Image (cartoon, rainbow, N blue to C red):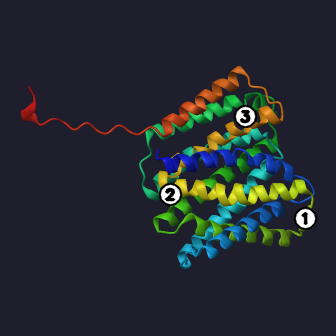
Amino acid sequence: MTAMNLSLYLLTVLIWGTTWIAIKLQMGEVAIPVSIAYRFALAAVVLFAILLLSRRLQKLDGRAQAICLAQGLCLFCVNFMCFYTASQWIPSGLIAVVFSTATLWNALNARVFFGQRIAANVLAGGALGLAGLALLFWPELAGHQASRETWLGLGLALLGTLCFSAGNMLSSLQQKAGYRPLTTNAWGMFYGASLLALGCLASGTPFTLDLSPRYLGSLLYLAIPGSVIGFTAYLTLVGRMGPERAAYCTVLFPVVALNISAFAEGYAWTAPALLGLVLVMAGNLLVFRKPKAPVAAAPLGSRA
């Protein structure tokens, strides 16, 4: 992994490993779709301002705009609505485990849509990471009773993961066409926020705003580090490293979140959790291991 890729990777993991705090602080009087719309509307404004001031805003043709609309629907609208709604019915640990399957979904989708070979080390690393997360959150998972709401929550979490993966593929398609993530993210976030706002208007959801420092501070953190920086870094990785390797971030950022929880909320590390952490890190090493170059056969005449 190059120094630039490593920097982007660590930045994404650290930022997305801390956004759960801000999301938790946002829960309250403002409806979930309204909070998500505020987040991406603000992020889009910031991105457009940066691009216009630096004269780096690329002009998109009709096809690219259509892909941005689809990306906004998948990545900045349905994805978040699914996970926020699922969190009302299933534990956050189970959501983290489902979301971590993005590594495997990205590998499969890259094969289906781009014809990329599925590397065995990526599949093995993703499976190890998934097993590690299951161990990390085992007490939470084992103590949860299955119900109709559980299955509905699982279905929504899986749908959210599939939408996230689809957004990755769309970003990769845009980058192959020469469009940079800064521009496509700006348009995608604008479309995602617009679709959420239209949904709120259609359903009669009120556009309230909590003016407390707690809510506004979390909104700013989610919009700028969490969206402008986090999504730009992550989707740049998708273009540079491939969707399947970049998606291993989804396995690592719950680990960061748990470490923060150990200090902020008294989370206690257990033996199974530590084993899970070892599996996650082993999976990370597998995912980024360079494949061995094939050994060329020696000419027949040179053999003794």
Spatial CA span between label 3 and label 1: 31 Å
Q: Which element is circle 1 on?
A: loop
Amino acid at dot 3 = Asn
Q: Residues within 10 Å of mark 3 (few under 14, many from 20)?
A: some
Quadrant in the rendering for residue 103: top right
Q: Which residue is mark 2?
A: 239
Q: Residues within 10 Å of mark 1 (few under 14, many from 20)?
A: some
Q: Which element is circle 3 on?
A: helix
Spatial CA span between label 2 and label 1: 36 Å
Relative horizontal placement of residue 269, taking residue 58 as reference (left or right): right
Work out whether mark 2 precedes mark 3 in sequence or the reverse, and give the earlier one.
2
Mark number, residue 259: 3
Q: Nearer the viewer, residue 97 or 14?
A: 14
Where residue 171 appears, as percent x and y from the top left, is 55, 62
Mark number, residue 209: 1
Q: What residue sits 72% from the left and 43% below the top?
A: 95
Rendered position, 119 above or below 234: above
Work out whether mark 3 precedes mark 1 in sequence or the reverse, and give the earlier one.
1
